[in-house]
Amino acid sequence: MKFLILFLPLFFIIMPVDLDAIRNAYKEAAHDKTKVTALNKQLSAITKDDDIVLVAYKGAAITLQARYEKNLKEKKRLFIEGVGYIEFAINKSPNAIEPRFIRIGIQENTPKLLKYKSNIKEDKLFLLKQYKTIKHEILKNHIKEYILQSKAFSDEEKAVILTP
């Protein structure tokens, strides 16, 4: 019994994060404060040594949390921390689609005064160019849904996504 009690906590630490669940949670968290809190909790153990996609999602979750923070100093701190994770992920793996998808979503929805909009064109072109190479259907569908509702993409660019 003591053996089980000692190793039970390790089971929860080692338990892998379900990336599809994170993808869905991120999509839902964009519009729901309680879901932001839950997403942050799911990603709390993620460090910069983990999978780069999870690092980017952790950054996005932190920036979403900053949106709901009332204290201005804490809001700024969280935003900077979140952006740091996203930029780290992209710098470490510049050709990865998902961190770029995450960054454009954050940049498009960030107020101008935060001056975090400089990569929208770059990420938009990257996503349009790489879209057809995405193998994972859930990710491809999330990106498609994002592009079709985004104001950053023109009707012509949206048509690229809709053509088989």
Image (cartoon, rainbow, N blue to C red):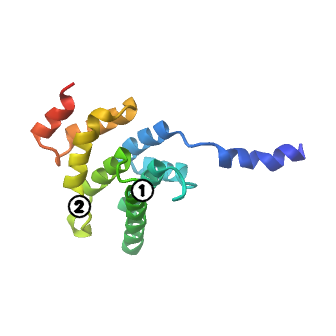
Judge by depth and name the residue closer to the eye, 128 or 106.
Answer: 128
Q: Name which quarter of the figure residue 83 lies in.
A: bottom left
Quarter in which the C terminus is drawn: top left
User: Residue at horizontal 14%, vertical 33%?
Assistant: 159
Q: Amino acid at mark 1?
A: Ala
Q: Which residue is found at the position 24% from the left and 62% from the top?
A: 111
Please report contact status of discs 1 and 2: CB closer than 8 Å, yes or no: no
Q: Amino acid at mark 2?
A: Lys
Q: Quadrant of residue 78?
A: bottom left
Q: Position of residue 101 (x, y in %)?
A: 32, 47
How far apart, in angstroms, are the residues tagged by discs 1 and 2? 17 Å
**In this picture, is 155 found above or below 54?**
above
Q: In the rendering, at what x and y percent does residue 161 appear?
A: 21, 33
Judging by the rendered image, the residue that carries numbered circle 2 is 117
Few, some or many residues within 10 Å of mark 2 (<14, 14–19, 20+): some
Query: Toward the viewer: 6 or 29?
Result: 6
Q: How many marks?
A: 2
Residue 57 vs 72, above or below: the answer is above
In the displayed structure image, the side of residue 44 where residue 148 appears, left or right: left
Horizontally, residue 84 falls left or right of residue 1, namely left
Which residue is located at x 20 percent, y 44 percent?
150
Q: Nearer the viewer, mark 1 or mark 2?
A: 1
Q: Position of residue 27 (x, y in %)?
A: 37, 42
Q: Indicate the secondary structure of the residue bearing disc 2.
A: loop
- Mark 1 = which residue? 89
